[in-house]
Amino acid sequence: MAEIVNRVAKSPIQTFNLEDIYPEGERVLIDIKEWLFQGIILKEKEFRESLKDQDWSRYKDAYVALHCSSDAIVPGWAYMLITSYLEPYAKLTVFGNLEFLNSLLYQKALNKLDFSEYQDKPVIIKGCSNKPVPENAYILVLQKLQPFAKSIMYGEACSAVPLFKKK
């Protein structure tokens, strides 16, 4: 009987798994609608009082996304004021949804990496993940790898989709 050889394990292909650089920490979406009069009108005095009454320490070490789920017209300073209260506690505060927040976190993490280790090597960007990896993170990592990699594929070694090949 012939010996079973794992050709994937012996392959020069490098796997880039975005889950490996997943920024750990709680993600929180804050809807400022609750601090608006009837959910749509920002009354400055009442808004400021509501913010003063919050326990901002509950956001310690969290990543926070601020948004408004109603059709209210919210001045930019309102989000900035909330951010000033969050600053001593939250790791990061952004305006947008959780996908935008995760995308920004991945961008920061990818910017810290040295991609030269992938120089002239075939790379697979792992496709399946158990963590919330936003689509934008895949686009960002492709852009980071492309100047270095010999080729880039997406998916798993057994069923990768070719994306790029150096000429």
Image (spheres, rainbow, N blue to C red):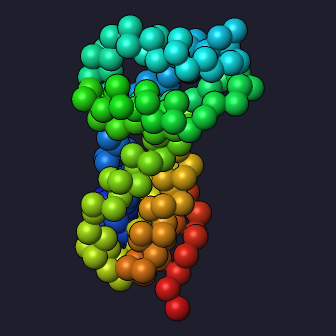
Q: Nearer the viewer, residue 135 or 60?
A: 60
Q: Position of residue 66 (x, y in %)?
A: 51, 30
Q: Nearer the viewer, residue 27 or 68?
A: 68
Q: Nearer the viewer, residue 105 or 90?
A: 90
Residue extending furthest toward the bottom: 167
Q: Residue furthest right?
A: 71
The answer to whether one can see residue 52 in this image is yes
Residue beneath the point at 35% across and 58% down: 110
Residue at 33 percent across and 10 percent down: it is 55
- Above or below: residue 112 compared with residue 114: above
Q: Position of residue 76 (x, y in %)?
A: 56, 38
**Residue 6 visible in the snapshot:** no
Residue 60: image quadrant is top left
User: Is residue 120 rendered to the left or right of residue 128?
Assistant: left
On the image, the x and y values in percent for residue 63 come to 37, 32
Residue drawn at 34 percent across, 25 percent down: 85
Q: Which quadrant would residue 24 be assigned to in this image?
A: top left
Q: Outermost residue toward the front?
A: 45
The residue drawn where x is 34% and y is 42% is 22
Residue 118: % across, % down? 32, 73
Q: Quadrant of the N terminus?
A: bottom left
| Labels in figure, total | 0
Relative vertical location of residue 110 with respect to residue 55 in this rendering, above or below = below
38 vs 104: above or below: above
Give whichever of 32, 166 is nearer the camera. Answer: 32
Please say if 105 is above or below 72: below
